[in-house]
Amino acid sequence: MKGFPESNSDPSHNSSRKKLNLNNSSKKILGSVSSEAEPSIGCNKHQKSASSWSGIWPQSLSIFSNLSSSHTKSESKSCSSSCSIRKKSASGKNYYERWRAAVRRVMMNGGSMRRILGFNRTSTSTSNSDIWLLGICYCVAQEGDDVNSSNPTQSEGFAAFVEDFSSRILITYRKGFAPIGDTKYTSDVNWGCMLRSSQMLVAQGFLFHKLGRSWRKCTDKPLDQSYIEILHLFGDSEDSPCSIHNLLQAGKAYGLAPGSWVGPYAMCRTWESLMWSTGSGVLSSAMALYVVSGDEDGERGGAPVLCIEDVSRHCSEFSGGRADWAPLILMVPLVLGLEKVNPRYLPLLIATFTFPQSLGILGGRPGASTYILGVQDENAFYLDPHEVQQVVDIKRDNVDVDTSSYHCNVVRHISLDSIDPSLAIGFYCQDKSDFDDFCIRASELIDQSNGAPLFTIAQTRSSPKPADNHNATEARDCDPIDGLPDDGAENCGQEDDWQLL
């Protein structure tokens, strides 16, 4: 890809159940953990515009101390310090004055009273179960620990998890960018969360592709040139190929428009269109992106079908015939229930995070999209795009730029059974062997689904898929791959507990 070095192989990416060597973990900074009733606000250092948000959500009432006279000094502290050290709130007249000031600042930043009053904090998670974060397992319970008295958030395993979590790219609402097209929109506040969540999922794919799954952001070392170039891809201008400006342009055919909210299916198709667009320049030689859809492109329900023959042809066409395969992002839009996720699918969703190819889930609360990137038991860890931040102009060659607003080490989780049933799962396969490994794992998961898989896999179709559209009506006429039941072709059209996409 132009402007990028060749992708390096990453040994950790192909490990089955990788558990990290945690030497020297005692030097790592532990992050805060919060359980929220709904998507909340991230915490990043050096962000004046977001200070009131960071105070509202991580800890109740801490917003008042953020607005106190010590506000300027506190901005220079790290995210973990500012989120874990809380000052006493004021009382009396000062209390109400600061409350009014806090509300005024939040509303000016595009917030709402629901964001201020609509949260319900619960106790911090103290589970000693393993954490799975995008294909890597973290053991938070050390051998010999007393599970009844030990604090898992103080373990070396949790420190390594936070380091990984805080290295993932966070993309949030921005304000102050150039108007989108011919409109007057210079911010995506209150309507762009689905676009931002999808940017996060795809950004992790670029990160894995160029820097490997084991890459971590270091605060005491110069920034990687490839890392800066990836952030540039997701900047907020038409010059950035994966910007919100270009996504909206590519998604017009799927109903995307400034000020309007879209669903995961339209978002996946928009990314597919963008990656194919000749105007995307650098994207045309980066990675292929394939949307796994069901019968009649998902409009009649049914489990989506991943046809290996189609994927192979897609990769070849994407590379212009120069190679038989290309690095690949798979996006699988799903609707797993009416008002909530059918419980039978929860174990399957959790299992996808154990895949080395995992890119997480595009989803969240109804009407409030987030990026889910890890699980522990039935809790989901996520990054939240609903923080309003000033636009940052990231140039490709500027390795000294402040990128703190693109990361967060405040760890938040919600119950997986509370997420919106309309979602999309992402996977990244760096080469053909990695894709084959993914198919093996997915086939095993299908065998464990008791007849209700998230998606199915077929080797070929009886007739070729038209190149000028995404019609998948031939999905029923498919040959199952080895290891799948003989009635796999019938299962391709199964509509058990599925809804319209």
Image: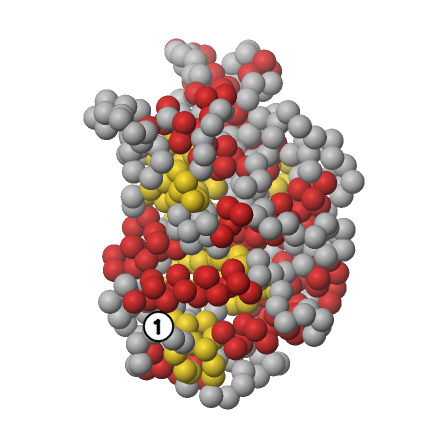
Judge the density around disc 1: few (<14), some (14-19), many (≥20) Cα neighbours within 10 Å: few
Q: Amino acid at mark 1?
A: Gly
Q: Which of the two residues, 107 or 245, is positioned nearer the viewer here?
A: 245
Q: Is residue 80 above or below residue 439?
A: above
115, above or below 497, in the image? above
x 49%, y 52%: residue:
14
Quarter of the image containing the N terminus?
A: bottom right
Q: Residue at x 70, y 52 (%)?
A: 6
The answer to whether any part of residue 316 appears in the image is yes
Residue 393 horizontal/vertical position (percent): 72, 40
Residue 25 spot, x, y in % from top left: 47, 26
Left or right of 178, for residue 312: left
Q: Is residue 356 rendered to the left or right of residue 494?
A: right
Tell which of 184 and 191 is nearer to you.
Answer: 191
The quadrant of the rendering that contains the C terminus is: bottom left
Q: Horizontal and vertical percent for residue 310?
A: 53, 76
Image coordinates of residue 74 in percent, x first then y, are: 55, 16
Residue 73, placed above or below residue 63:
above
Which residue is pictured at 68% across the width and 34% down the height? 223
Q: Which residue is mark 1?
A: 483
